[in-house]
Amino acid sequence: MSKHVRQKPRQPGRQRGFLTSKQAFVLLGLLFMAPAFVSWVMHHAGDGGWKPEGTTNHGKLVHPARPLTLPADLMAGDKPLDLYLQGLWTLVYIGDGDCDAVCNQNLYRLRQIRMAQNENMNRVQTLYLLLGDSVPPVLQDMVSKEYPRLTVVPVTAAQARSIAPFFRIDDVDMSQAERVYYVDPLGNLMMYYTPDAEPNGMLKDLRKLLKFSRIG
């Protein structure tokens, strides 16, 4: 006579190999929380948070961006300089009236990078902050012939002392840095380039900024 083995009845709502409703609820909660947790870890890991190694910008970011508070008597033509910086992306170089080879090279870069933006060229302006009371005739002649869209703003010694903290980065004074700075359309200093920076990288960065920016 055959023996019959009594099987235990299956519990309702439970299938072999599947989670219970409670386990599924917990797992679903963890899945929703994971992105927030990863983001928190990335933000708090190390000094300044975690940053991917393959960053796409070629310039060095000023973090946090620095709103430029400028002297009221610092003028770009007939307009206060802080007002001049509003509404457009501004490429800035700081130097003296001699404008040596490095200076001339950077002014050339400013012109070419702006022109290379094609249909977005009018969203960009170039600025030479000249450390001196006036523009020397030789420099004025060179600017008129080679850089007619460049705005030259003389900066007196008192005005230079006022703006110097904004442009002092890595303990290098603005008068010695020979850098190119990018200022956004809200007047914030947000990126800079050393004298040996690749012009093609500078161009790509600005092109990307113009592409994704909703201002300027």
Image (tube, grey):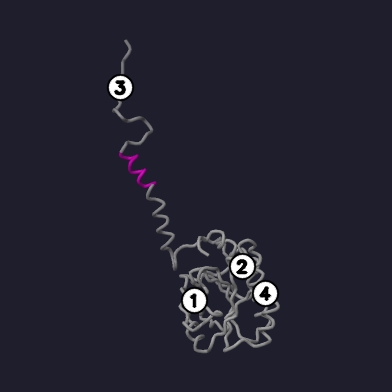
From the viewer's perspective, is the residue at label 4 or at label 1 nearer? Answer: 1
* x and y, in percent, of residue 174 in the image: 55, 82
* x and y, in percent, of residue 60 in the image: 55, 70
> Which tag, 2 or 4, sits closer to the chain's start?
4
Q: Which residue is mark 1?
A: 82
Real-space Cα separation, disc 2 to disc 1, in angstroms? 24 Å
Q: Which residue is mark 3?
A: 7
Real-space Cα separation, disc 1 to disc 3, in angstroms? 85 Å
Other residues around mark 4 within 10 Å, as few (<14) / some (14–19) / many (≥20): few
From the viewer's perspective, is the residue at label 4 or at label 3 nearer? Answer: 4
Residue type for callout 2: Met
Q: Is residue 113 left or right of residue 173?
A: right
Which dot marks residue 202?
A: 2
State the residue at coordinates (67%, 69%).
112
Dot 1: what SS?
Answer: helix
Other residues around mark 2 within 10 Å, as few (<14) / some (14–19) / many (≥20): many
* x and y, in percent, of residue 142 in the image: 69, 81
Question: Does the stretch in magenta take in 63?
Answer: no
